Structures are given as C-alpha cells and as structure tokens.
C-alpha cells in the first residue's frame, strides 16, 4: 500500500497539486477532461475519509497575470460533474454539494476560504501561473500556498518535471509524514519504474513522432535497457537517409544524420536491435486527398514523402511486439490523424493490446500515442496510459524529476 492509501485524512485539509491543464474551446467548455478524471479517485478517497480538499493547478500559459481566458473557474462545471453527478449513492454526495472557488491562490479570499473549509468540501484555487513566482519556484510564494492546508499531496505527474513552487518547493514546508503522492502520481511512478528498472525481457520500445532531436536522450537511455527499439513516424526517415537511403521529400533532420548513425552504432555495440520500417505508405503531398503508393522506405521517389509505415513493416513490427514481455510506446507510426495514413499506428496499437492480453506489461505515453489508443478504443487494453507527456519523456531520459524527488527525499 502507498503512504496515501494508508493515510487517514479525517479532519485534515489536503492541499493537492493537480494537473488540470486541459483543452478548452472558445465558449470555455472543457473538450477533453482526461486529466481531471484521472485525479477523481484521489479526491474521493480524501473526502470519504472525512477530509477536505484544496486543489491547486495551472491552466495554459498566461504571460501577463490574471486573464479570464485562463481562469480555472471554467473548469468548475466539469469537475463538479465528475465528482458528484451520477453518483447519488456516494458517501460524500448531497444535493447542496458544490465545488467552491477562490479567485486567487494566496490572497485574502483564498486564505479565508481555506480556513473555513469543512470536511467533505472541495475548494478550487485560481490559476497558479497568474503569479510569475510559481514558475520561478519562489520559496515565499510556496510557503504561502503551504499554509492553506496541513497535508500536501502531489497528484500532477504532468508537471513533475518542473521545479515550480507548487510541484517541488512547497514540499519543503511539510513534514515527511504529511507529504505524499496521490493515487494517480503513485500509479505513474510505479508504472514508469516497472518499465525502466524492472522490465522483463524481451523489452521493446516503440518510438515514433516527427523529430529525432526530441527523442535522442530517450533512445540513448533505452539502449541500456531494451532488447528491441522500433522507430517509426517522421523521425525514421532521418535514420534511413543516414544509412544512405533515398527518402524523397520525407521529413528529415539533416543536422541529425550523424546522431542517427551514432545511435545505430551504439545499438550494435550493446546488441540492441533497432528496427526501421522496410516499407512506407508514400504520398505526393501532405494532405488527406493525396495520391498514395506503397514503396520501400529507402527508395522513395523525388516529390513523394513517407507518411505511414507500410504493410511489410507493420507485419515485422507486430511480430516483435507479439514476442515482448515489456513494451514502452511513445509516438505514432505516421500521420494517423488522416485516415489514409492511420493503418500503421492502428496496427501497432492493436499489437500492443494483444501482447498485453498475453501477459506483457505495456506503458503508453506522449500526447499522440495516448490520442491514438483513445481513437482506436484501446486505452483500457494496455497496462497503463500515462497522463504526462513531457514528464514521462524526461523520466525515460534518465533525468530526476523535481516533483518526484521532493516527495521521495524523505
């Protein structure tokens, strides 16, 4: 059991750092509440114990202080529905229940609202990033936040790689027994550690996306752990060109060709198999209505570009994934947002799900990979779907995440 699960929050005011940085449309409606949904079990556990909850989050990237566009008051309705609507038999439900809101996070109203908060109540503080001190990791700002509650819970894996006031510095103002990960953060850390430090072999890392430069450190770190690394998406063409292939007008980072060769050589030395797509779905333009053909990935004609892995590559990748006992997937195999170029990503998603059903542990992370498993209705058929794109990448680069270190050091 985690420290959080063992802790009795009765009579406590839990100050929770959540990551409610969710997309909002022009009418201020939340268009994807995944991140809010992920923290509900943590909030409900505290309320069920007889504690009260004070939520801290950021929303967007406000540059000039408080602006209505980035006010977290726009999240209240979604949070309320997830917490209470449809759960009339829950222990913490009554018809008068509502999510309270303070239009500041350290000001007079926030302090007053927190001080009179009753057991079973939820208070949402205004956007932390309305204060520049948040991103600067200001100690005075962090201390003011800390005084609002008597227990600190970090449940925001998506911001764990930031040494901000509310994610790392604030923990210094709580004793070891009163600072902890929430259920979401604990699950994120355990899943990541299982892949990085306790992986069963064969361990296959599936790395996709557009740029080699975004994934260099991840790949280099995984070369010490994985048995197989599958590379797809736009970044594959940098590797293919580095090996002497003709890639037409496919995406390529010419300044990373030597980097790609270095990675291939390092893999060879460490006896790690790197798999590049043998064929591609190529197009004569980057558009949904483009003309397409199947072509070997290293002889793409001029004026054509690779936008998805081909059927031969798909078969090879699926066979590798099927034999794996540990799978990490970060990045799509092609431009899966367009129907003509989604087959490769969909096939890989299905292969990961099938391997998981056969006993493999699979971790999917990164915005596009998560979007893919959601699009193909496979999120509940993999072992874990991470909520933290940047944080997960930095973790797999081997970096120490400030938000995790702040809790673990005690």
Image (cartoon, rainbow, N blue to C red):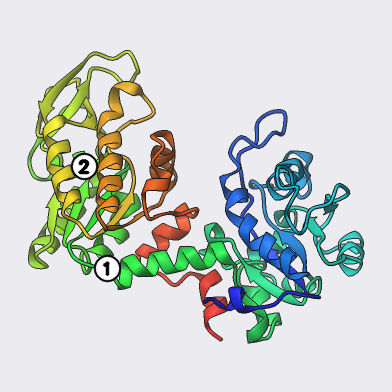
Q: Nearer the viewer, residue 104 or 362?
A: 362
Q: Which residue is mark 2?
A: 236
Q: Is disc 1 placed on a helix, strand or loop?
A: loop
Residue 278 coordinates in the image, percent (x, y): 10, 37
Taking the image as drawn, is residue 241 in sight? no
> Residue 199 has which mark?
1
Residue 407 coordinates in the image, percent (x, y): 57, 77
Which of the 4 image quadrants contains residue 183?
Answer: bottom right
At label 1, counting other C-alpha atoms closer than 10 Å, the crowd grade (few under 14, some 14-19, many 20 or more) is some
Residue at image point 72% right, 28% down: 27
Residue at image point 68% right, 73% down: 152
Q: Is disc 2 placed on a helix, strand or loop?
A: helix
| Lateral position of residue 119 relative to residue 193, left or right | right
> Mark 2 near mark 1, Cβ–Cβ under 8 Å?
no
Q: Nearer the viewer, residue 93 or 137?
A: 93
Residue at image point 76% right, 75% down: 143
Residue 108 coordinates in the image, percent (x, y): 92, 63
Q: How many marks?
A: 2
> Residue 62 has which mark?
none
Q: Quadrant of the C terminus?
A: bottom right
At label 2, counting other C-alpha atoms closer than 10 Å, the crowd grade (few under 14, some 14-19, many 20 or more) is many
Taking the image as drawn, is residue 25 in sight? yes
| Residue farthest front in this picture | 89
Which of the 4 image quadrants contains residue 301?
Answer: top left
Residue 300 coordinates in the image, percent (x, y): 12, 27
Kindly report the distance in space between the C-alpha atoms of the residues bearing marks 2 and 1: 25 Å
Rendered view: 345 above or below 190: above
Q: Nearer the viewer, residue 285 or 384?
A: 384
Rendered view: 42 above or below 4: above
Q: Nearer the viewer, residue 6 or 229?
A: 6
């Amino acid at each position: 059991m985690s420290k959080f699960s063992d802790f009795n929050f009765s009579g406590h005011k839990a100050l929770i750092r959540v990551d409610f940085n969710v997309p909002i449309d022009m009418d201020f409606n939340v268009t994807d509440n995944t991140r809010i949904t992920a923290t509900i079990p943590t909030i409900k556990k505290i309320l069920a114990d007889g504690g009260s909850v004070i939520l801290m989050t950021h929303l967007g990237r406000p540059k000039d202080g408080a602006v209505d566009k980035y006010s977290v008051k726009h999240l209240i309705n979604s949070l309320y529905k997830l917490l209470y609507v449809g759960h009339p038999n829950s222990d913490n439900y009554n018809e008068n229940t509502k999510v309270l809101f303070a239009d500041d996070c350290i000001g007079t109203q926030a302090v007053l609202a927190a001080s009179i908060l009753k057991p079973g109540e939820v208070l949402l503080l205004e956007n932390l990033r309305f204060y520049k001190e948040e991103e600067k990791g200001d100690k005075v700002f962090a201390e003011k936040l800390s005084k609002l509650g008597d227990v600190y819970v970090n449940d925001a894996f998506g911001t764990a790689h930031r040494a901000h006031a509310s994610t790392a510095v604030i923990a210094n103002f709580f004793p070891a027994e009163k600072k902890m990960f929430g259920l979401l953060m604990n699950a994120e850390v355990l899943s990541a550690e299982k892949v990085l430090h306790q992986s069963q072999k064969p361990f296959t890392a599936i790395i996709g996306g557009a740029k080699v430069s975004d994934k260099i450190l991840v790949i280099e770190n995984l070369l010490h752990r994985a048995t197989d690394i599958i590379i797809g998406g736009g970044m594959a063409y940098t590797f293919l060109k580095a090996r002497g292939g003709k890639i037409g007008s496919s995406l390529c980072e010419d300044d990373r060709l030597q980097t790609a060769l270095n990675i291939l050589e390092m893999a060879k030395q460490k006896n790690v198999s790197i798999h590049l797509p043998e064929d591609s779905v190529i197009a004569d333009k980057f558009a949904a209505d483009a003309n397409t053909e199947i072509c070997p990935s290293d002889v793409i004609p001029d004026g054509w570009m690779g936008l998805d892995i081909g059927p031969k590559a798909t078969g090879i990748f699926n066979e590798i994934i099927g034999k794996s006992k540990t799978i990490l997937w970060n990045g799509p195999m092609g431009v899966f947002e367009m129907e003509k170029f989604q087959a490769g990503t969909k096939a890989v998603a299905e292969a990961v799900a099938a391997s998981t059903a056969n006993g493999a542990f699979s971790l999917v992370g990164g915005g596009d990979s998560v979007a893919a498993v959601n699009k193909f209705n496979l999120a509940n058929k993999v072992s874990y779907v991470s909520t933290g794109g940047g944080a997960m990448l930095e973790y797999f680069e081997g970096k120490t995440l400030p938000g995790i270190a702040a809790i673990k050091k005690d």
